[in-house]
Image: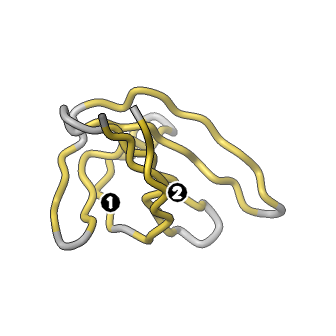
């Protein structure tokens, strides 16, 4: 399994519940990808910004999404493929 570095802004549909963020879908290159499962989450502080990271799968590939809590922007960072 390898990965492709993307680092592009994306639109993400999320559910906020009990102080957590749960991505449900994202749009990349005009294609809407469902999030079947969040496989891992972590966070990193960069200066004043807290970045939330999500490893998600659409059932076929694995993607790394991040959310910048200061700018309120989402990014697709990596795509892991077989």
x, y percentage for residue 79? 38, 48
Residue 8 image-quadrant placement: bottom left
Q: Which mark is residue 62?
A: none
Query: Which is nearer the eye, 79 or 11?
Result: 79
Residue 22 image-quadrant placement: top left
Asked if residue 71 is positioned above or below residue 67 in the image, the reply reads below
Q: Is residue 57 left or right of residue 51?
A: left
Discs 1, 2 touching: Cβ within 8 Å: yes
User: Circle 1 — which element?
Assistant: strand
Q: Looking at this rendering, what residue extends furthest in the top direction?
A: 39
- Neighbor class of circle 2 (other Cα within 10 Å; few <14, some 14-19, many 20+) is many
Residue at 43% in and 71% down: 9
The residue beneath circle 1 is 12
Q: Is residue 47 left or right of residue 68?
A: right
The residue beneath circle 2 is 67
Query: Which is nearer the eye, 57 or 12?
Result: 57
Q: In which quadrant is the N terminus drawn?
A: top left
x, y percentage for residue 40? 48, 28
Q: In which quadrant is the C terminus drawn?
A: top left
């Amino acid at each position: 399994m390898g990965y492709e570095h993307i680092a592009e802004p994306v639109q993400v549909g999320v559910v906020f519940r009990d102080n957590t963020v749960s991505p449900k879908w994202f749009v990349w290159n005009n294609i809407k990808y469902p999030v079947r499962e969040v496989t891992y989450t972590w966070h990193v502080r960069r200066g004043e910004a807290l970045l939330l990271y999500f490893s998600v799968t659409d059932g076929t590939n694995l993607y790394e999404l991040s959310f910048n809590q200061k700018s309120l922007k989402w990014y697709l960072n990596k795509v892991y493929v077989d």
